[in-house]
Amino acid sequence: MLKMPQQQYIRFLREVEGCSVNEIAQRVGIHWRTAKKYADQTDWNASVSKRKSRSPVMGPFMEIVDTWLEEDRLLPRKQRHTGVRIYQRLRDEHQFTGGQRTVLAYVQKRKSELELERAKTYERLEHPPGEAQVDFTTLEVSQGHQLLTYKLLVMSFPYSNAAYVYPTPAENQECFLEAMKQCFEQAGGVPQRIWFDNLSAAVVHIEKQGERQLTDGFQRFCAHYRFEAVFCNPYSGHEKGHVENKCGYSKRNWAVPIPIYESHKQLAEYFAEQAKQDRERQHYAQNRRIVDLWEDDRRKLLRLPEQGFEAFRLSTAAVNKYGEIRIHDTAVPLLGMAEPGSEVLIQTFWDRLVILNSQHQQIREVPRPYTGRTADIPWSQVFTEYFGSTGPLG
């Protein structure tokens, strides 16, 4: 299996540079079957101005082809038009009378122009529709008469000033990726390009030349949802100033007074509703509602994958003589489920811990400690272990 940076590079060559499988195999130095496997892998758990035609044959059909090419950028690679397929549709659906070679030449030329236009837009730090910025902000919430510190992930869209948010009890990688996934699902799609700060949940460290070494989980997440991750330069928060302002706005307007909640689901629904109501107001600079401008953003979103990404971290733990394991200074009883001295595998999700035995079968699931929830002790299994199936008096 190739390492994640190699897989990411193959995806970049296929998705961004449009390389064929053979070209990728030659550039990366791998077998073509391996190149094809990663280039077409789908489950990893900019406006076009109207052009004046100089071609008497393609002229009336250029806008149609341009629209298809723009729409293709929002779809997985396998579902995009090939040049031949574009020719066939023009011929069958639009009575195109020209030759296939004419269409193929135009498609190749137009793809290059669209990529160039997109690159120039990004160089000017402009934010076209379908582009977002992400950051965490810290706020206070109340549950069970206790004041708790919570994190709110804010995903803002500079073009429309719309925002989608999701609260998490911490800022670790599992919480970060889960919150991102929830925002994608609220928005109904994935931003093509997302700007981030150099948060530890995504970046291991920054090289001298400015290159980022990303966490394996974050790389898989990017590949799964097919968006381009862009990181701000160190000490350059202005590069994502929109989300910085939106974080402050959300705290002042949605967390005052302090939100009181009974369950995490209730808190998440509260913030989602606040963000939804906020999209009904007028844009701060344009004489239009945010929700109307959001439609331009929404049309540029990438399609959600069929399966959502499950973010978890794997670790191992030894069962002690008392039949329990220790996780974050918390004892988890496994009496009757695992033998003392044996080793178990732990899947750490943002809100729960799943314990697996040596055959990778689930034997217990408990809440993650910081969620504040408790887990019942499976007394029936404990009694079976100590007294047998007949019970203590049998």
Image: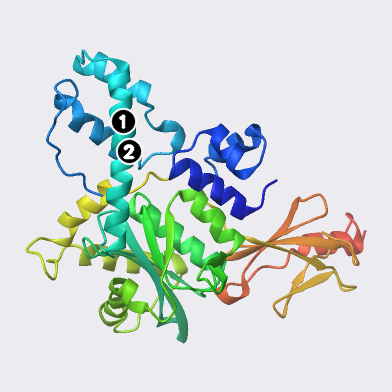
Q: Position of residue 292 (x, y in %)?
A: 15, 55
- For label 1, the crowd category at 10 Å Cα-Cα, with few meaning under 14, some 14 to 19 and many 20 or more, is many
Residue at 58% across / 42% down in the picture?
27
On screen, residue 144 versus residue 5, left or right, reads: left
Tell whether label 2 touches label 1 (CB within 8 Å).
Answer: yes
- On the image, the x and y values in percent for residue 14 come to 49, 41
Whole-percent x, y for residue 278 in the image: 21, 67
Q: Measuring 53% from the left and 52% from the top, which residue is drawn there?
A: 309
Q: Which mark is residue 111?
A: 2
Q: Residues within 10 Å of mark 2 (few under 14, many from 20)?
A: some
Q: Nearer the viewer, residue 97 or 297?
A: 97
Distance between the Cα atoms at labels 1 and 2? Answer: 6 Å
Q: Is residue 44 visible?
A: no
Q: Residue at x 38, y 39 (%)?
A: 75
Which sits in the foreground, 341 or 2?
2
Q: Position of residue 312 (x, y in %)?
A: 61, 60
Q: Would residue 204 be found to the left or right of residue 280 on screen?
A: right
Q: Quadrant of residue 66?
A: top left
**Residue at the (25%, 54%) spot, across then down:** 129
Residue tagged by mark 1? 107
